[in-house]
Amino acid sequence: MTAAKSGDTVRIHYTGTLSDGSVFDSSEGRDPLEFTLGSGQVIPGFDTGVTGMIVGDKKTIEIACDDAYGPVHEDARQDVPRAQIPAEIPLEVGIQLQMQSPTGQVVPVTVVAITEEAVTLDANHPLAGKDLTFALELVSIG
C-alpha cells in the first residue's frame, strides 16, 4: 500500500472537535475533503497528521493551536465608534461581519462586545487560541 506523502492529492473524511468535545466542523454527509499534501491548503497540523496514512486508515490527531490557527492576537481586536456602523447592519455579539482594510482586502470580523459608544470587532480566526482534535479517515490518494 502507498502512504500519503507531500505532493499527493488526498481525499479525507474528518470530524473536528474542541477540547470540550463539541464538533466545530465535519465532512459527514458531504464529499470528502480533497487537498494536496504539503501545499498549504490546510492547517499545518492537519497536513502532518495525514502524511503517512494509507487508504482506509483511521486515526485521531491532536493539533496544538500553534499548528492550527495560531494564538489569539489582542491587536486584532478593535473598538469602532458605534456611530460609524451603518444603522442597517444588525448588531449582536457573535455576528460575523466583513470589513475592508485600508489596502482594500476584505477581512471577516466577529462582534465580541457592544456598548452605547462602541462596537468591539475581532479579526482573529474563530478557532485561534484553541487546540483541535480531528478524527480522520483517508478515502483515497490520487
Image (spheres, helix red, strand yellow):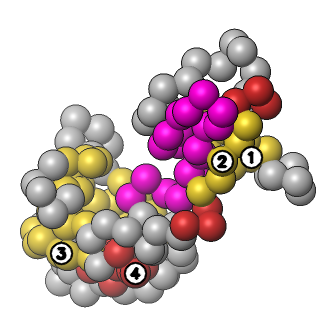
Above or below 129: residue 2 = below
Q: Is residue 11 left or right of residue 126?
A: left
Q: CA distance from mark 4 to mark 3?
A: 14 Å
Earlier sequence position, callout 1 versus callout 4: 4
Q: Residue at horizontal 18%, vertical 75%?
A: 61
Residue 107: percent from the left, percent from the top? 68, 49
Q: CA distance from mark 1 to mark 2?
A: 18 Å
Q: Which residues are magenta?
A: 109-127
Q: Which of the 4 quarters of the picture holds residue 17?
A: bottom left
Earlier sequence position, callout 4 versus callout 2: 4
- Which of discs 4 and 2 lies nearer the camera? The answer is 2
Earlier sequence position, callout 1 versus callout 2: 2
Question: Do the residues under discs 1 and 2 have CB atoms within 8 angstroms?
Answer: no
Q: CA distance from mark 3 to mark 1?
A: 32 Å
Earlier sequence position, callout 4 versus callout 3: 3
Question: Do the residues under discs 3 and 1 have CB atoms within 8 angstroms?
Answer: no
For disc 3, the neighbor class at 10 Å (few under 14, some 14 to 19, many from 20) is: some
Earlier sequence position, callout 3 versus callout 1: 3
SS of the residue under disc 4? helix
Res 66 label: 4
Number of on-image labels: 4
Res 106 label: 1
Q: Residue at horizontal 58%, vertical 18%?
A: 90
Front residue of this view, candidates 73 and 82 = 82
Mark 2: amino acid: Asp
Q: Which residue is mark 3?
A: 61
- Which of discs 1 and 2 lies nearer the camera? The answer is 2
Q: Is residue 32 visible?
A: yes
SS of the residue under disc 1? strand
Res 97 label: none
For disc 4, the neighbor class at 10 Å (few under 14, some 14 to 19, many from 20) is: some
